[in-house]
Image (spheres, rainbow, N blue to C red):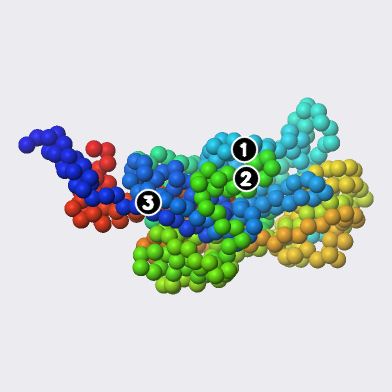
């Protein structure tokens, strides 16, 4: 018998057997966390289910959020009637999932104004500014261009060719990260973070510190101690001793073309949840999760109980008290808290050794010096010569007495404590993506590589594919007459 009639006969037999054996019902999914990770899992499950190469179907999706609003670590704050990002605030031009979400949800992209090209930077060591760029209040494009050119020359005179080496280091990382957007036929489904990183060629960056990686790349100690340190303190609240991949991602977040969503980045999560036909449970904190008779049972602090075939943890477990039965095992991990303080008022120039407020750079970054009380202070909006809205990042809560020293005027002050991201160290140790041998998944395991809105979406996309792939395999295993054929069909779906 030739191959073609044999293949036709096998497929005919498959159709006859499948018509006699009804398809399993769609799987229900429970997701804990409504941030970009949880909302992306819901989106990709809906988008990919019941489509080639997956035959698994997804039924009801529930998302549990302990707060009253969705978005997780994406949130906004209102200062004097204006809205500003309080959590995850910037997106990179190569954050392709976020760009696609923005297009899909018809959201509006907000880019920095043209005046940002003249945004002045000062590096503060706790006593003095060791480096300052030029600035200009002129709105003339020509003037801004000259100031930008002068700043580029000034940066080059201080840091030399190390600036280009830093750019090349970031570009190499981004080139590897872009592999996660490849089509299905050239991108496998990953069952562990290590496997995911090794496939893209990024794993080695998690085994050394950023400082070690940059020394190997030929960057000067001066650039690492000053500019790179300022960037990592702003983006991750940590020094250049963080792991190399997190550091490279942090450096990418200081480049050009950065953007956000008009009205708040949290709208991505809200939009994905709405269009994924999710049953949302706000003000619902899950205190226990058990696997009982083939189902996951989730119990809330209010005494409500929910069941589903698949459970997804899309929030960091490090500071939660969810009881798992059977128990799970994940590496101990410390979260880095970032305290964000918004102030409407005016900085005190004497605190920085100046006579005039205009002498203070619009972005004050700090070095890793003992006693420096903040990571950065930046101007969000200028209402007048002595009336501005500022954003302060610090590792500790800013005391009122200290704020009174730093500011000459404070009309409004808002303080937020974020359990923002992991405290990075090298070599990194990763939690499992699959927390049991069944269908309990952990999106935030990838955060030990790097923590951004886009890396959460990348991890969520892989988790969605992993869920569907494993459900498809389990469906085949449950169909005794087709078990062998299903296995073969998944390996050779191109037939």
- 3 vs 2, front mark: 3
Measured from the top left, where is residue 7 in percent x and y? 16, 38
The foreground one among 203 and 7 is: 7
Q: CA distance from mark 3 to mark 2?
A: 28 Å
Measured from the top left, where is residue 434 in percent x and y? 41, 61
The foreground one among 263 and 380 is: 263
Q: CA distance from mark 1 to mark 3?
A: 31 Å
The residue depicted at 75 percent of the width and 46 percent of the height is: 83
In which image quadrant can residue 29 be found? bottom left
Disc on the earlier residue, 2 or 1:
1
Measured from the top left, where is residue 81 in percent x and y? 80, 47
Disc assigned to residue 26 = 3
Residue, disc 1? 107
Residue, disc 2? 267
Residue 112 visible in the current orientation: yes
| Circle 2 SS class | helix
Do tag 2 and tag 1 residues touch (Cβ < 8 Å)?
Answer: yes
Residue 124 visible in the current orientation: no
């Amino acid at each position: 018998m030739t191959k073609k009639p044999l293949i036709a006969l096998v497929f005919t037999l498959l159709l006859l057997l499948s018509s006699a054996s009804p398809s399993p019902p769609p799987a229900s999914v429970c997701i804990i966390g409504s941030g970009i990770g949880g909302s992306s899992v819901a989106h990709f499950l809906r988008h990919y289910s019941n489509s080639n190469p997956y035959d698994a179907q997804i039924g009801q999706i529930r998302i549990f959020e302990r707060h009253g609003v969705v978005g997780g670590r994406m949130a906004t704050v209102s200062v004097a009637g204006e809205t500003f990002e309080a959590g995850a605030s910037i997106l990179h031009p190569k954050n392709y999932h976020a760009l696609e979400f923005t297009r899909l949800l018809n959201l509006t992209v907000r880019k920095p104004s043209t005046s940002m090209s003249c945004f002045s930077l000062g590096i503060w060591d706790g006593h003095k500014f060791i480096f300052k760029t030029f600035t200009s209040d002129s709105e003339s494009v020509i003037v801004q261009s000259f100031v930008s050119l002068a700043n580029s020359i000034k940066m080059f005179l201080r840091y030399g060719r190390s600036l280009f080496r830093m750019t090349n280091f970031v570009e190499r990382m981004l080139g590897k990260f872009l592999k996660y957007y490849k089509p299905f036929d050239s991108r496998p489904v990953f069952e562990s973070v290590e496997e995911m990183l090794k496939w893209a060629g990024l794993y080695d960056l998690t085994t050394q510190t950023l400082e070690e990686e940059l020394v190997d790349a030929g960057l000067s100690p001066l650039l690492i101690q000053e500019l790179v340190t300022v960037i990592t303190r702003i983006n991750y609240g940590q020094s250049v001793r963080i792991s190399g991949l997190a550091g490279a991602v942090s450096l990418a977040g200081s480049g050009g073309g950065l953007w956000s969503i008009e009205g708040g980045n949290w709208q991505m999560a809200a939009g994905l949840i709405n269009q994924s036909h999710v049953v949302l449970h706000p003000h619902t904190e899950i205190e226990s999760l058990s696997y009982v008779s083939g189902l996951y049972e989730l119990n809330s602090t209010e005494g409500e109980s929910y069941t589903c075939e698949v459970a997804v943890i899309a929030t960091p477990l490090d500071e939660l008290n969810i009881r798992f039965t059977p128990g799970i095992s994940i590496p101990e991990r410390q979260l880095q808290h970032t305290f964000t303080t918004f102030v409407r008022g005016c900085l005190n120039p004497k605190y920085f050794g100046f006579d005039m407020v205009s002498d203070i750079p619009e972005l004050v970054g700090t070095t890793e010096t003992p006693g420096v009380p903040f990571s950065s202070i930046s101007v969000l909006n200028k209402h007048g010569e002595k009336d501005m809205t500022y954003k302060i990042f610090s590792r500790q809560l800013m005391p009122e007495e200290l704020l009174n020293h730093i500011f000459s005027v404070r009309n409004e002050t808002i303080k937020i404590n974020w359990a923002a991201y992991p405290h990075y160290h090298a070599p990194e140790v990763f939690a499992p993506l699959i927390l049991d041998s069944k269908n309990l998944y952990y999106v935030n395991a990838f955060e030990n590589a790097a923590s951004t809105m886009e890396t959460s979406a990348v991890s969520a996309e892989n988790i969605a594919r992993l869920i569907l792939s494993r459900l498809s395999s389990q469906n085949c295993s449950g169909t005794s007459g087709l078990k062998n054929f299903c296995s073969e069909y998944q390996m050779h779906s191109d037939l």
